[in-house]
Each structure stands twice: as structure tokens, then as C-alpha cells.
Image (cartoon, rainbow, N blue to C red):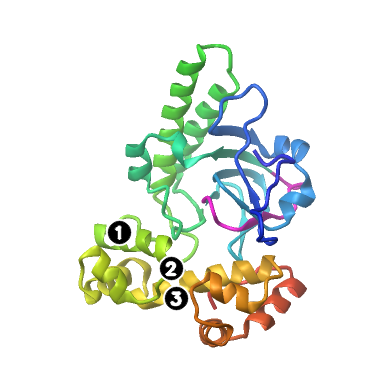
Amino acid sequence: MVKKRQETREGEGEIREVPFSAPAGRPAGVEVLTLAELRERADACRLSAPHRPGFHHLLLLDRGRLVHCVDFREHELTPGDLLWSRPGQVQHFGDLAGAEGRLVLFESGFLDPATAAAARIEDWYGPAVRRPEPAAARALDEALGQLHREFGALGGLPLEVHLDVLRHLLAVLVLRAAHPGGAADGPGDGTCEAGETYLRFRDAVERGFTRSRRVADYARALGYAPRTLSRATEAVAGVGAKEFIDRRVVLEAKRLLAHGDQPAARIADRLGFADATNFTKFFQRQAGVTPIAFREAVRGGGGAVDAVS
């Protein structure tokens, strides 16, 4: 979990990478804890600073209010809200003192592949916060309660059996979390309508956005016409394929600008631009400000900025 074990990839010096770290004597891959336990065990300053976990956060708020920022978008959670942040997303907690809830941390590989696919846990573009409908909320609460009790019952079963039970209970929870039956917090909730075309394109962009920003390249690699990709992306994400790619590039640029000190030329190179001038023109066109102006604004104002302007 988020203890003192914080690491940064060598040579980057920017966003703090947080690997999953199982508590002593606990099975690897999953942890269930309350926000009260999180307050006791984790450094509040570390939690409030931007970091990039390598694991999922699934949080159900029971009482109070909590502000949580995911990729420059600030979310204010109230009781009953469900937060799901994915590995690789940059996030930070607000003041935890007035909030009570339950938090599940898990690595993607802990779930079986069929469940991971059905729950679309790799959908980094899904909404971070949802408010489940009453019936779905009750079922979600029960599933989380069962998982929490089983996690605390270490020793009641042989370790391998205990792990299997945790895996099955987590599967129930993430499947219910993926289909809460309530309105999403923000645009782009295409979970029910997302077709295979969009999902394949989305995953290809995630793998290749630092190498290509051309729709034609993705269309050729996936075996679709560019127009087919744009129709699918428009139906699910509300933007065309080119805009979808550009937004992903801008998001990564904002992460690097906000949480590091690398010059624009180095960021341009990492994101596949020929030089800093091209990168600056692209960023200003998409975000409305220059990279340096964005960095100064975020650092001067706390960092809660829309992921894409």
C-alpha cells in the first residue's frame, strides 16, 4: 500500500512512482483498509503530493467529504460516491481528516483475465467518480463489506484458499463497480456502448501515443479505415479519433510539466516531437497556453486543472 516506499524512475526526477507494497504478513496483490487506517499508516504529506500509483484505488466514501484529484481534475466526493483511479494516473488526496470510507488497493494482475476484461479495468478513460443508484449502492456496499471481512480473516483458511476467496470477492466488487447503474461524474462514459473498435483503438493509442499522432497509422495497424475509427471514438468518447490521440498526448505533457523540471525540449523528445518548437505550438493550440505558462500556473495554483483545456 502507500507506505514510505516511494520510488522514482531513474533519470526522470518528476512524478513520484508508487509501487504496490503488501503489508507485512499479508498476501501480495490486494489490500483493504479504512480511511482511518490510511491516516494512521501513511504520510499525509506524501498522500497530498502528486504521485502515480502502479495499482488501482477503489474508494467508497461512507461519511464526510473528500477532495481527490485525478489527472488535473478535482473531484469532491460525498457519502455514497465511488472513486476508481487506475494505475498510471497521477493523483493526490485532499484533507482526509473529515472523511470516512473504505479503500481497496489492487494490482491488475491479481484478478483473473476474464474478470479484468468484463470489468474493463484497463479503461483509463472511464469516469473517475460515480454515484451508484440505490439498489446498486447496496449491492456494492455488501460486496465491499464481504471483501473487507475476508481480508481481515487471515489465518482462518489455508493461504492459497484465502487468496482464491479474496480474488473471487474482489471480482464481484469490480464487476459491480464497473456497472453501478448511476450517472457518471463527467463526460465520456461509453462503457455500455463501447464496441470492439473503440476498445482496440484506445489500447493502441495508450501503447503508441509517444510514437505516432496520426489516425492513419493506427487504422493501418488495426485493420480499419480512419473514418471507422473516428465514428467509433465519436460514439463512445464524444470526440473524433485525432482529437482523442491529441488529448492523450496533452495529458501526458501536462503530467510531465506539472510534476517535473524537465525542459520543453526533453518533454518534446519523450512525446515524439521533432523539436521543442513543434511541441510548444501543439501544446498551445490544444491547451490554450504555452507549456511554461501551464507549468507556472499549476505550481502557483495547486495543480487542480482540467486534464484537457
Q: Which amino acid does label 2 sit on?
A: Phe
Labels 2, 1: front one: 2
Q: How far apart are marks 3 and 1 (CA)?
A: 17 Å
Decide: few, some or many residues near mark 1? Use Cα within 10 Å; few <14, some 14-19, many ≥20: some
Which range of residues does the magenta coloring cover?
86-99
Could you tell me what secondary structure mostly forms the magenta stretch?
A: loop
Q: Is mark 2 on a helix, strand or loop?
A: loop
Which mark sits nearer the N-terminus, 3 or 1? Answer: 1
The one nearer the camera, 124 or 95, is 124
Q: In this view, does 246 lie to the left or right of 36?
A: left
Q: How far apart are marks 2 and 1 (CA)?
A: 14 Å
Do labels 2 and 3 touch, CB within 8 Å?
Answer: no
Q: In this view, does 69 lie to the left or right of 301?
A: left
Residue 264 falls inside the magenta stretch: no
Q: Position of residue 57 (x, y in %)?
A: 56, 45
Which numbered tag is attached to residue 209?
2
Do labels 2 and 1 touch, CB within 8 Å?
Answer: no
Q: Position of residue 251 (x, y in %)?
A: 53, 69
Where is mark 1, residue-wise?
200
The one nearer the camera, 276 or 81, is 276
